[in-house]
Image: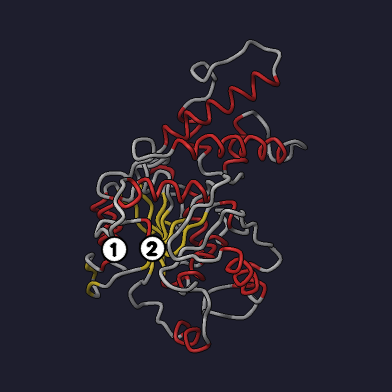
Amino acid sequence: SSSLSSSPSHPSVNNTMQWNRIYASILSAATLSITKGFNCSRMTGFPIKASPTVVHPSQTQPSCLYSNSESTATETASATSGIRGVIFDIDGTLADSWNLGFQATLTVLTDYHNANSGDSQHTPETYPLTSEDYHFGCRYTTPERLARHVGLEPDHPTFKRVGEELGKQFDDYYVKLVDQKTAGFYNGIGNLLVRLHCGEVVGEGGGSGVQLGALTNACVEYAHAVLKANCPEYASDSTTESDKAIYNRFTSIHGANSVPRPKPFGDGIRQCCLEMNLQPSQVLYVGDAPTDAQAAVDAECRAAIGVLWGSNDEDCLKKEKGFGTLCSTVDELENAIGKYL
């Protein structure tokens, strides 16, 4: 995956390079049992592939810097107590962005075909990729998805190289096209995020605010762009704090190029949990793809919730044991999350 030349800035980060050094040192010590049920040893041996533009959002100082007392308190948290964080997938879960991704994919694949094929030339309108094929491919990272779209299999000697080249072109192209029109939140999602963070979603144990995280298999630059595009503070010229602000409410934001391994591995969820100062058993993961459920299981989250308005239907998602609940509407999602609060 590629990164853009401008860094996605988050107001709580003052020195990205210093933070990256601190964070890398913490991960190198990840063999310590920081939390019960958090298998840190799975992260050892996989160097962090942090993009130079990756930032680590936090409302105060980086929250993964545990003190001994904080670690002890976290270990004693009951697995049956209310959750303290919700991590969301982005495309097909928070944002109705499929057409942006689809059109950008057609553009990139058309350019690749016309440059490498002696057959008749294509335009994005004539390139033979169906929306069904695109939706199915969205369960993979961008480089793998694009390599598969041009007919390569993972065992092909050029699979990785071609995928990375196409992924770079795709990222450079489509991240710049993100706005509220091309990647707007589904109706009700923005309000749900604000209410979750403020403690206005009342569950069986009462109402208390939770931390928010975002994890996508797209690049991290895209994640920042989408959350900013849907935040009133960044979508307008306003410089005042808004009670409807969304972007700053996310403690942790990551993509496939800023975590050790992308979904279906649980590395990204565990990395978000570190920054949220939570253990995975205190967190829900919400997504729309089989890989979301698989990542939640691998990370040992409290539970995973699947949404049916994204790239996969009920027949597909109900096969995933990681999804304890499937939701057809945002109201159903709020109720499902409320049961864990």
In the rendered view, tell whether residue 120 sits above or below residue 204.
above
Which residue, given by chain and number where applicable, does mark 2 sit on? 212
Pointers 2 and 1 in contact (CB under 8 A)?
yes
Q: Nearer the viewer, residue 204 or 30?
A: 30
Q: Nearer the viewer, residue 284 or 223?
A: 223
Q: Position of residue 96 (x, y in %)?
A: 36, 40
Q: Nearer the viewer, residue 129 or 113?
A: 113
Residue 44 occupies quadrant: bottom right
Q: Residue furthest right?
A: 157
Labelled disc at residue 196: 1
In the rendered view, tell whether residue 168 sits above or below residue 121.
below
How far apart marks 2 and 1 lie (CA) works out to: 8 Å
Q: Quadrant of the N terminus?
A: top right
Q: Position of residue 303 (x, y in %)?
A: 41, 64
Q: Residue at x 69, y 40 (%)?
A: 154
Q: Residue furthest top?
A: 120
In the rendered view, tell whether residue 255 sits above or below residue 282.
above
Q: Position of residue 118 (x, y in %)?
A: 71, 13
Does 37 sit left or right of 226 as displayed? right
Mark 2 belongs to which amino acid? Leu
CA neighbours of label 2 inside 10 A, class few (<14), some (14 to 19), many (20+)? many
